Amino acid sequence: MKASDLFVKCLENEGVEYIFGIPGEENADFMMSLSESKIKFILTRHEQGAAFMADVYGRLTGKVGVCLATLGPGATNLVTGVANANMDRSRLLAITGQTDSHLLHKESHQNMDAITMFKPITKWNWSIRNPQNIPEIVRRAFKISLEEKPGAVHIELPQDIAKREADIPPIEPQHIFRSEPNEELIKQATQLILHAKNPIIFLGNGCVRENASKNLRKFVEKTGIIAMNTFMGKGIISDDSPLHLHTIGIKDADHALLAMKSADVVIAVGVDLVEYSPKNWNLELNKKIIHIDFTPSEVYTYYRPVVEIVSDIGDAVDAILAELESQKKSHPELDVFPRKEIPEIFKQILQEVDERRDSFNDDTAFPIKPEKLVIDVRNALGEYDIVLSDVGAHKLWISKIYKTYQPNTCIIPNGFCSMGFAFPGAIAAKMVYPDRNVVAMCGDAGFLMNIQELETAVRLKIPIITVVWCDRDLGMISMKQKNEFGKSVFTKFTNPNFITLAESFGAVGYVVKSTEEFPMILEEAKKIIDKPVIIAIDVDYSRNNVLLNDSHYQNVKAKV
């Protein structure tokens, strides 16, 4: 069997549905083999867009998303998307071509050391030198990408190796069962919870990755303990729950941060420290932390678990709940399980968060307020529809205002934080869930970073909706410059006519002229089923100062 055929068969064996990317000369054999496969190749217009699509595919399916590029500039173009997936713990395989292996020791056309380049942004990578090793290398790549904590891997296939013969069959994937939580540690965690005055449950990305939402919802309801989530943990607990304080992640003027600082025991479940630094909430090193995750905690000054439970998250949460119920049965007089009263500080915070959001329900000022924009998008979508946020000031508004009811329905990159993520990511999300509405929320800077993928969406007839928040400024950078230096510099730009731009690609474009018409345009956009829609709207970003100096936050602080 030809080596490139074997490579493709190994990918089929791993259940690969799509490969996103751009072919080149040095991966021509692989592409010919792929043309005979049931795997669908999605031609993108830039390798970065391909990597973002593979990233989102991995987040939504729990499988490994695959992207492909040729050598040299093709490989370098993948880098940002691969790094984003790796730091956000998304399952991704990057495949790159390479010149003939006998030329790699010297200067040759487009030759560069891609293995070294990808090493710091992947969990593992390898260059194939013997076609007989392909089944082992592919199986190992998928196994490493999937295991906790998941991330990106990379395989390089030189063109001369792709042409050789191999007779080793693919290696079958094996399901791996995780160990059960340690019984003694479960008892220790239970005692900490029972003796806590203001415990709080802190939920992160790991709970979404491993589908622990059902277990955690039951735990919150049965215990009565207040929960909150990181940006990447939105939807683990429904934002409609009276026991949920929504999202933490803004260092200043953050209601959830105030709640965290008031807690004495923090039950941190599936939280990657890259999501939100513990230094923000444990500066005094006075929190008793229960760490629950698939892997041991990072060594970090401000994150020192008293109890560290390393096992399947759902199993650990269920085991603690069972032990709490056992303790209650043995000691009926226990009045801390379940907790019948929400601490006053948590009541005040939840009230202020809801009032702040709801006060903009009927706001008609234009340019539209960020709060009103997010509310209108939320009202237009169902419980399981998907919103993807790009990176910028709008990400903070979406994280705090957008009510999320199910995990993986509000996707916010918050590890590597790459601008340009949301639009190509939305294409992949719609491919995974064609029956759901999918909305990309982008700043006008981030949207144009991968505008070329509009052709991809039009060609594939993918009806995603993109809302472009327009202020003609790098708003987050501008805001931080003003706060530190009293002025902003080098952040202003101009925008195209978004209607003309969309139509030139074969898409549909709108420019919103008033706040009142925005919901109507959203409804029109939802009716379009065979092409993407771009909706540009001017946003009043003077509201960004609220993110750094919130009078509501100060009011709560004063009350408690």
Image (cartoon, helix red, strand yellow):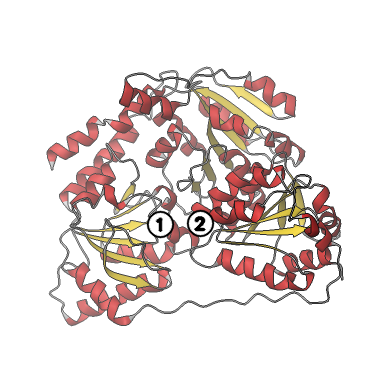
Mark 2: secondary structure: loop
Q: Three-letter amino acid code at disc 1?
A: Asp
In screen coordinates, is 27 left or right of 308?
right
Residue at x-position 58% and y-position 27%: 535
Crowd band around label 2 with a 10 angstrom C-alpha radius: few (<14), some (14–19), many (20+): many
**Residue 473 appears at what percent x and percent y?**
48, 22
Q: CA distance from mark 1 to mark 2?
A: 9 Å
**Residue 337 appears at what percent x and percent y?**
21, 68
Residue at x-position 26% and y-position 30%: 549
Q: Which residue is mark 2?
A: 89
The quarter of the image holding the N terminus is bottom right
Residue 528 quadrant? top right
Question: Is there any visible trace of residue 524 in the rendered image?
Answer: no
Q: Is residue 308 above or below residue 414?
A: below
Q: Is residue 524 above or below residue 413?
A: above
Question: Is there any visible trace of residue 178 in the rendered image?
Answer: yes
| Residues under numbered marks 1 and 2 in contact, where contact means CB atoms less than 8 Å apart | yes
The quarter of the image holding the C terminus is top left
Q: Which residue is mark 1?
A: 272
Residue at x-position 80% and y-position 53%: 27
Residue at x-position 38% and y-position 58%: 271
**Residue 311 appears at what percent x and percent y?**
41, 73
In screen coordinates, is 27 left or right of 244?
right
- Residue placed most toward the observer, 170 or 259: 170
Q: Three-letter amino acid code at disc 2?
A: Arg
Q: Earlier in the sequence, mark 1 or mark 2?
A: 2
**Residue 74 appears at what percent x and percent y?**
71, 44
Q: Is residue 258 above or below residue 501?
A: below
